[in-house]
Image (spheres, rainbow, N blue to C red):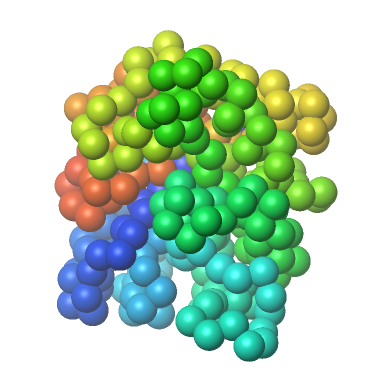
Amino acid sequence: MNRKMMIAGNWKMNGLSAEGIGLAKEIAAKVKQKKRTCEFVVCPPFTLLNLVKKALRGSKIALGAQDCHFAEKGAHTGDISPVMLRDLGCEYVILGHSERRADHKESSALVAKKVEAAHNCWLKTIVCVGETLEQRESGKTIEVCSRQVRESLPEGSRAANVVVAYEPVWAIGTGKTPTPQEVEDVHAAIRQVLAKKIGKSEAAKMRILYGGSVKPANAKEMLTLEDVDGALIGGASLKADDFIAISDNAGC
């Protein structure tokens, strides 16, 4: 199956106005330097969305957000609705990131509710799944990730509106990574779960990204695996050279 590679940057809670504009412009300039075969997405914090959108104008880089509420409007102080994100020009939103699941106690049921709301507002979703170190050491990696996929994707999920990102929690920001074989095993298991949930044809088309200490040095061995269709990049996405080098080493 010929799935288009995706290189997505999650800036997390980083960047003030000048930094965000500068980084976005630098990434856009580097993407333009040569023909690219992958899809690029940048997901800055809410405060930078409008500024980054303007900085990316004229490029083919998609704008994404890092979270959204499930309601379109209402008494939800501090939250951002999917319709607001769409109004700002977002194409994607990250949902179910492990930091949201841990820090904000988000369940897969809540993630599914958010995913459905995002789809209803014509946003595409990057849905994150992944196991903790304790779960991994207990041999529950496949079980945990499979359950999260089943419970986090609502009815109507398909390859056109969902990208799944496997991010082992213990690898995020630590410099530690699973072996390429371990990554491939989890991605293959996720695709099997998807086949049962949305059908073999849609599952074969849906992209599954890897995330968790992705950097130029390990991009080639991770992102050329059969069931790996790109990367969701954290810290390395805050440096334009590293972000582009990852796509280069992934062959896109």
Residue sitting at x 71%, y 59%: 113
- Please determine whether, in this image, residue 11 is positioned above or below residue 58: above
Task: Note whether residue 30 is visible.
Answer: no
Percent from the top left, x then y, of residue 219?
30, 28
In the rendered image, the quadrant that contains the C terminus is: top left
Q: Nearer the viewer, residue 176 or 26?
A: 176
Q: Nearer the viewer, residue 30 or 137?
A: 137
Tell me where residue 60 sits by quadrant: bottom left
Residue sitting at x 60%, y 76%: 81
Percent from the top left, x then y, of residue 108?
64, 48
Q: Is residue 193 left or right of residue 54?
A: right
Q: Is residue 208 left or right of residue 236?
A: right
Q: Is residue 88 left or right of residue 18?
A: right
How many marks are shown on the rendered structure? 0
Q: Is residue 100 left or right of residue 48?
A: right
In the rendered image, the quadrant that contains the N terminus is: top right
